Structure formats: C-alpha cells, structure tokens
Image: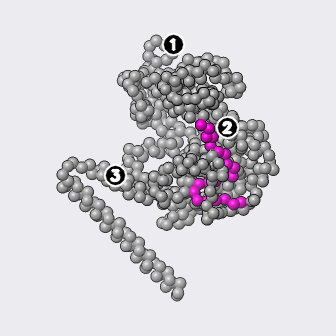
Amino acid sequence: MRFIASALFAVIVFGGVFTVQAQDVQSEMIKFGRLLRLIDTYYVDTANVNKLTEDAIVNVLSKLDPHSVYISKEEVEKMNEPLVGSFEGIGISFNIFRDTLLVVTTIPGGPSEKVGLMPGDRIMVVDGKPVAGIGLKNSDVMDMLRGDKGTKVDLGIQRKRNSELLDFTIIRDKIPIYSVDASYMLNDETGYIKINRFAATTTEEFLTAMNELKQNSGLKNMVLDLRGNGGGYLKAAIELADQFLPNDKLVVYTEGNNERRKEYKSTGIGEFENGRLVVLIDEGSASASEIVSGAVQDWDRGIVIGRRSFGKGLVQQPFPLTDGSIVRLTTAHYYTPSGRCIQKPYDDGLKAYQQDYLTRFENGELFSADSIHFDEDQVYSTLTNKRVVYGGGGIMPDIFVPLDTSANYVFYNLLVRRNILNTAVLSYLDNNRTKIRKKYNDFSAYNEDFAIADDFVDQMVAEAQSEKIEMTEEGEVFARPLLKKQAKALIARDIFGPGYYYQVVNKDEKIIQKAIEVFGNAAEYQKLLVAK
C-alpha cells in the first residue's frame, strides 16, 4: 500500500508539473500569435511576417545550445544530400578555371561519362546560354547542372583539338556521394581506410573496402582515419564500431531530461574484430567519429592517435514544421561506454564555443602535450584494462601528435588559399593529361617515377610575386617540397581517382608514420593498452 501511495503521489505531483508546463507553452503560443497579428494589422510599414517568424525561431534556438538549429524548407534537401549518399545531377566534379567551367573528373558510371564527357572538357554553353566569361560562381553551376532525375540538360563543349563546339544531351540521374575517401595497404601487413562522413552508405562502402584489403592475405593491422570527419548518422557510427568490437559490447548510450537512457550494442559479426587497430582523430573529428573512437578506447580495442577531438556529443532530432522547414532540436547527450559525456561545455555562450579551436591554438594544446590540462573531476576507467581516461568534452588520444606550427607554413598556405597551387595544377593537366595517361598505365608506376619539376614551382613563386604575396627565402625553401607533393597528389586524383590523392600525401605524414611505428613493435602496442 505504501508503494502504491508513493506511486500515486508521484503521478499526481509530476502529472501536475507537466500540466502546468503545457499550459505555459500554450499561453506563450497565444501571446506570440497575437503579436504577429498586431504587427500584420497595425504596424506602420510593410512587415514580412514569415521572416519575422523565422528570425524569432532562430533566436530562440540560439539560447538553448550550439547545435539546435532551424533549417528552412529550401535548405532541407541540400542539407540531406551528403548523408543520404546521393544527389541528382550530371555526375561531374568541376572547377572554374580562368572564368570557364572545366570538367575535372566524371563520376564512373554516371550520366556524363556514359555520353562521353571527358576530364579537361570546357562547358561553354548550358541549355543554349553561354556560360564562359560571365563570372560564374560554384552556386551558379550547381543550379544549372543539378536537377531531378530523368530531366535533360544540353551542353556545348569545347575540347582540345576540336575547332567547333561539341553538343551533348545528358539525362540527369542519381549521383553517389562517397564517404570512404581512400582504402589501400600502407605496407604488407597494414591496411588504411579514410572516412570523411558517416552517411547512409558508409557501412556498405567500408565492407567493400575491407573485402578488397582482405585480398591481401597479410592483413594484420588496420588504420582507421577519422581526422576531419564531422560526423553524420548515429546508425552508421554504431555499425562501424561493430566491425571492430566483439559481441554484446556497449558502443554508446544516449540520455536526456526528457529521453530515457538508450543503449546501442555490438553484434559480434564485425569484419575486423581481432587484428590490431589504430584510430586517427584530430580537432575536426566530431560526433559519430567520437562515438567510434570512444568505443574503441573504452574497450581497449585499439590505440587512438592524434589530438583531442571536437567534443560534439549532443543528439539532434528533426521535427518538421508546417511549411516543410525543420527544427533540429537537441534531445539527449551521447556517452561513451565508460560513461564519459562527449559534449564539451558551452556554458560561456555561443561565441566562446565557436572559438574553441582558436582557444586551443592560443593555449598551445594543438602543439604540445604539456599544454593539455585534464579535468580531474572527470576521471574514468576503460572497461577491459582499467586504464585512466578523461571526460570533459571530446576524446583524448592515447598518443598525442602535434600540429606542425612552423612559421614557414605561411607562404605555402597562402599559395593554397589564393588558389595559385590549384590553378597551376589545372593548367598543367590541361596541357599534359593525355601524355601522363600514355606514359603511366597504373598508379604504382606513376607514384614511383613521376616527379614535379622545379620550373613548375618557379611558376607558382612568380605568380605569388605578381600578386604581392609576402615570402621569405626560408619560406620558399620550406614550401617547395610541400608544393611538389601536393601537386603530385592532385594530379594523381585527376588521372587515377580520388583515393590515390591520399596515397601520395600520406607517404611521409607524421601521424601515419606513428601508426606504423606502433604496429611495428607488438610489445609496445600491448603496453599502450595496459593500465599504468
């Protein structure tokens, strides 16, 4: 009887609280509705009630947390494309080169490749309208070339060695957006997979990549690169973590004031449950990336290398509004298996939250492990070996690899940001694409023998001087090998495919070398997983 009485009391009390809250919400809705009617009826000037409503929604959400957002009807479809894994269009990657729309690559199997469009082609006319020399922007190109599946677009193409424009009619179709950027063997025993987002197709892409890597019977180690991966679908993150964890292991759980704890566990049918594993993260790894790396770390399944991740651990649920727009509202927090909350604090307001990277930069956290200060109130233990790990926002790696801060990077970064490097590569490909393809039948031969000449870099330096970009002699000397490496990687991407870019840029990268070093010493690998 005492229990029943207590339960009845709880229902009455909390039921009463919920009723009062509902009445408060109803009262505020009526108040705001009356305000809009007053403005519409009596305001001295013409007022856009729709915009006022949207502005009010945006302002209200900004008071809650950094990730609760309003998405207009027009933005909903574009927002979903990268995660759904496809969009509808003609299937090319492009660049605006000297005010002309240049085809960089055609998507394999896409509508443009099927009709014979080729890298290096210049799109001069779209549906009868000239598009060269008119100051095109990327958004203009999207508007012209994307469209519903089954619709057509007529293109006038200028191609080298053809004096007249070539006419193409292309029927738009679904174009895949890949989330696995690259997969290849770093050495005879070590595979590498880089994932750029967690989309609807990520698990399928990962399994395909793993099957290809497993063709190499020596596969014993795996490097999973999640640097710069800002997250995506929770389901995809759980499925990816499942590839590495044994059966019935907690991957992540969610919990909020109005949402009960919900647990997500592994199934034990993973593709790489027993080999040695390294996960790479950095300050751009967020949300779903932190779920995977946190689960790997908490179960002592592998080594996490890099820098502290972003710290985005809020669960957003989309709620549709009456006009097709959406409110993406935070409903819960993500927690790693050991109980760490992934979300970093946002008590100091939106501006401080958005400037967190700059704060880390200025505090030296990106450059020195000694500048990292752990929150001693947020101490946790891994679940297998009882290693100490810390909460307080983000995933802290087991091995810290600093950001390279050489002042000599300034000149190199300016050449990249001012588009001088990219323009030089496009120009080089424009003149040499056919020659490179004839000379190098496969990537291995290209990677082994192809080298960027000094005069290629000389031309970029001269262009920088003409644009009055400041440089020092040390900066130029420092930038030359980086420019050569980046140019070679960009050319490889154009000739052989997107994934080959990483095979060039990863070759001497410190964080990759650290992963290989860890795998190279089995005793050291195991030691890193043991509690100190």
Query: Mark 2 or mark 1: which comes first in sequence?
Result: 1
**In x, y percent, where is residue 21?**
38, 70
Q: Which colour scheme is used?
A: one colour
Q: Which label sits in the foreground, 2 or 1? A: 2
- Relative placement, left or right, of 426 versus 519 is left
Work out whether residue 57 can be spotted: yes
Q: Which label sits in the foreground, 3 or 2? A: 2
Measure the alpha-carbon separation of dots 3 and 2.
Answer: 45 Å
Q: Which amino acid does label 1 sit on?
A: Arg
- Relative placement, left or right, of 27 versus 9 is left
Q: Which residue lies furthest to the bottom in this view?
A: 1
Question: Which residue is denoted by mark 3 in the rendering?
Answer: 55
Q: Do the residues labelled 1 and 3 touch (CB within 8 Å)?
A: no
Quarter of the image for residue 438 reads top right
Q: In this rendered view, identify the residue nearer to me: 20 or 310.
A: 310
Question: Which residue is denoted by mark 1 in the rendering?
Answer: 161
Q: In this rendered view, identify the residue nearer to me: 341 or 514.
A: 514
The C terminus lies in quadrant: bottom right
Per the rendered image, the range of residues in magenta is: 387-407
- For label 2, the SS is loop
**In x, y percent, where is residue 484?**
63, 27
Q: Which label sits in the foreground, 1 or 3? A: 3
Q: How crowded is mark 3: few (under 14 residues within 10 Å), some or many (20 or more)?
A: few
Q: In this rendered view, identify the residue nearer to me: 402 or 428.
A: 402
Measure the alpha-carbon separation of dots 1 and 3.
Answer: 54 Å
Measure the alpha-carbon separation of dots 2 and 1.
Answer: 40 Å
Question: Which residue is denoted by mark 2 in the rendering?
Answer: 509
Residue shown at 78% from the left, 53% from the top: 527
Task: Specify whether residue 391 is painted magenta.
Answer: yes
Work out whether residue 113 can be spotted: no
Query: Mark 1 or mark 3: which comes first in sequence?
Result: 3
Q: What residue type is labelled 3?
A: Asp
